[in-house]
Image: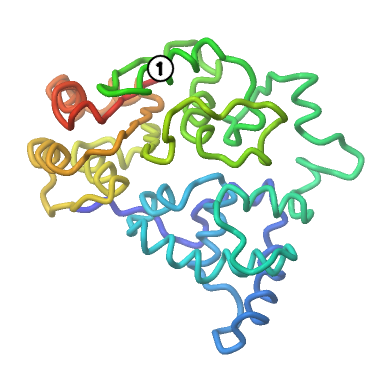
């Protein structure tokens, strides 16, 4: 059984609160008609869904995992469609969008953020954050707005700077920023400097482009079974997923195929330990054995 993720129109719908989505759709459709007049009118449901995922801060690989699609297929679709429309919409030269992380900044500069995030009478968010760096509420997804935790970051990056990568647990009270820390780890080493604060450090790792990052949110019940979680991990790793994916087959496939350094970020791991019976001690011991003694030390597991 494969993971079946909801692909309805409302996937990634949380962006409606932060972006002028209907205005953006209309302007993107105009750009599409200008670039490809022979194609169907308007954005397709798939294009809209991918756009919302990017605006949520998800990478193409994460979008593919959430939608149970092939990562390379998603990336190819984006390069042929949304990336080209965005360049025209924001007055950039063709084929200049190389990094998906630029999309949020480009559209924010073009005025598609809602007034609740960026209004004409408000100071830029980064100036506010410099004055008051603690932001209570949802996790911080963009590394520009993450402050502090230098000691913790240095310790964690040192754990997986060189093989064998080591496991770690981040412990803290609720709402103390653990999820924001994981998201920062995931993006800070490969994001382009113009998207960050002046002088913000990115050189935490040697050859950061070699690393794979997989974010697992255990508040999602679809990841609460062995098969569901293992299929999700294999999809994110772009490894073959069998019809009956059990722990033994997963360990065999990953041990045979994984050679690039891979960091699995387990968010809300307490939920997994307390609610999901299939994720028992035997399961975690198998993953720990894989990370410590197999795959040439190429896997790191960080839980919070």
Q: Is residue 23 visible?
A: no
- Mark 1 surroundings within 10 Å by alpha-carbon count, few (fewer than 14), some (14 through 19), many (20 or more): some
Estimate the x, y position of residue 293 in percent, counting from the top left.
14, 23
Q: Residue at the location (27% across, 41% down)?
A: 233
Residue at x 39%, y 50% (from the top left corner): 66
Residue beneath the point at 57% across and 35% down: 141
Q: Residue furthest bottom?
A: 38
Q: Nearer the viewer, residue 200 or 61?
A: 200
Q: Residue at x 69, y 48 (%)?
A: 105
Image-based side of 163 in relation to 294, left or right: right
Residue 92 position in % (x across, y down): 71, 64
Question: As displayed, is residue 134 above or below residue 277?
Answer: above
Colour treatment of the image:
rainbow
List x then y, in percent, for residue 18.
Answer: 69, 46
Quadrant where the C terminus sits is top left
Q: Secondary structure at mark 1?
A: helix
Residue 185 seen in render:
yes
Q: Nearer the viewer, residue 259 or 146?
A: 259
Farthest-out residue, right: 121
Horizontal and vertical percent for residue 189? Answer: 50, 33
Image-based side of 303 in relation to 88, left or right: left
The number of numbered badges drawn on the structure is 1
In this view, the residue in front, 232 or 160, is 160
Left or right: 18 in relation to 55: right
Image quarter of residue 75: bottom left
Q: Name the residue carrying label 1.
A: 158
Q: Is residue 21 above or below residue 162?
A: below
**Name of the residue lying farthest toward the front:** 206
């Amino acid at each position: 059984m494969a993971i079946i993720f909801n692909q309805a129109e409302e996937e990634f719908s949380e962006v409606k609160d932060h972006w002028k989505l209907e205005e953006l759709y209309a302007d993107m459709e105009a750009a599409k008609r200008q670039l490809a007049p022979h194609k169907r009118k308007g954005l397709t449901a798939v294009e809209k869904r991918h756009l919302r995922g990017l605006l949520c801060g998800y990478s193409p690989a994460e979008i593919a995992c959430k939608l149970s699609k092939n990562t390379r297929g998603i990336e190819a679709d984006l390069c042929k469609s949304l990336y080209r429309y965005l360049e025209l919409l924001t007055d950039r030269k063709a084929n200049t969008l190389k990094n998906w992380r630029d999309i949020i900044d480009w559209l924010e500069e073009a005025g598609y953020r809602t007034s609740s995030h960026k209004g004409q009478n408000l100071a830029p968010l980064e100036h506010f954050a410099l004055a008051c760096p603690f932001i209570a509420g949802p996790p911080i997804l963009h590394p520009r707005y993450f402050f502090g935790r230098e000691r913790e970051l240095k310790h964690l990056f040192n754990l997986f700077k060189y093989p064998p990568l080591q496991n770690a647990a981040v412990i803290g009270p609720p709402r103390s920023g653990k999820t924001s820390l994981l998201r920062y780890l995931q993006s800070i080493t490969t994001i382009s400097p113009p998207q960050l604060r002046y002088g913000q450090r990115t050189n935490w790792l040697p050859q950061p482009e070699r690393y794979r990052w997989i974010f697992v949110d255990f508040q999602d019940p679809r990841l609460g079974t062995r098969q569901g979680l293992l299929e999700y991990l294999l999809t994110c790793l772009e490894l073959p997923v069998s019809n009956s994916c059990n722990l033994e087959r997963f360990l065999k496939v990953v041990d045979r195929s994984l050679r690039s350094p891979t960091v699995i970020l387990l968010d809300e791991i307490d939920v997994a330990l307390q609610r999901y019976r299939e994720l028992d001690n035997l399961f975690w011991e198998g993953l720990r054995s894989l990370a410590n003694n197999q795959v040439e030390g190429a896997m790191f597991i960080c839980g919070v």
